[in-house]
Image (cartoon, grey):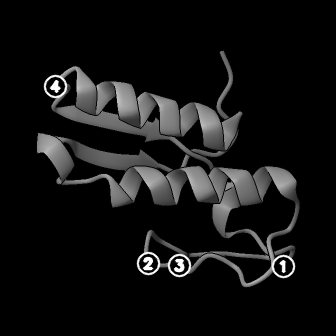
Amino acid sequence: MNVGGTENVIGVATACGVSKLVLTSSASVVFDGSDQAGIDESAPYPEKPFDDYNETKAIAERSVLAANGRYGLSTCSQRVAGLFG
């Protein structure tokens, strides 16, 4: 769902002329099982994802970021942690 659903959203957004797309990603996309502190958006994706959820969120995030600038679409990804509600 993280990957296919996100790719569907990108496809529909570009087909419908949407100009901006914000992905609610997860801080887990850069989590490799070790303690992390003071990291920012330049932190690389781990070579081996911690679990399937983290891996699929990272794939979805990469897709959204790769779509930036295509067909007039501006994209970004918010790596939130502990989102509830």
Q: Quadrant of the C terminus?
A: top right
Q: Is residue 32 left or right of residue 18?
A: right
Q: Residue at x 53, y 36 (%)?
A: 6
N-terminal label among 4 and 2? 4
Residue 17: assigned label = 4
Quadrant in the picture for residue 16? top left
N-terminal label among 1 and 2? 1
Q: Which residue is mark 1?
A: 34
Estimate how packed mark 1 is, as few (under 14), some (14 to 19) or many (20 or more) residues with alpha carbons within 10 Å: few
Of badges 4 and 2, nearer the viewer stands 4
Quadrant in the picture for residue 84? top right
How far apart are labels 2 and 3 at the CA level? 4 Å
**Please, what secondary structure does the residue beneath circle 2 have?**
loop
How far apart are labels 4 and 2 at the CA level? 30 Å
Q: Is residue 19 left or right of residue 37?
A: left
Residue 85: assigned label = none
Q: Is residue 47 left or right of residue 11?
A: right
**Please, what secondary structure does the residue beneath circle 1 have?**
loop
N-terminal label among 4 and 3? 4
Q: Amino acid at mark 1?
A: Ser
Q: Which residue is mark 2?
A: 42
Q: Amino acid at mark 3?
A: Ala
Q: Which residue is mark 3?
A: 43
Q: Are marks 2 and 3 in contact (CB under 8 Å)?
A: yes
- Residue 68 point in image, percent of width and height: 25, 53
**Please, what secondary structure does the residue beneath circle 3 have?**
loop
Q: Are marks 4 and 3 in contact (CB under 8 Å)?
A: no
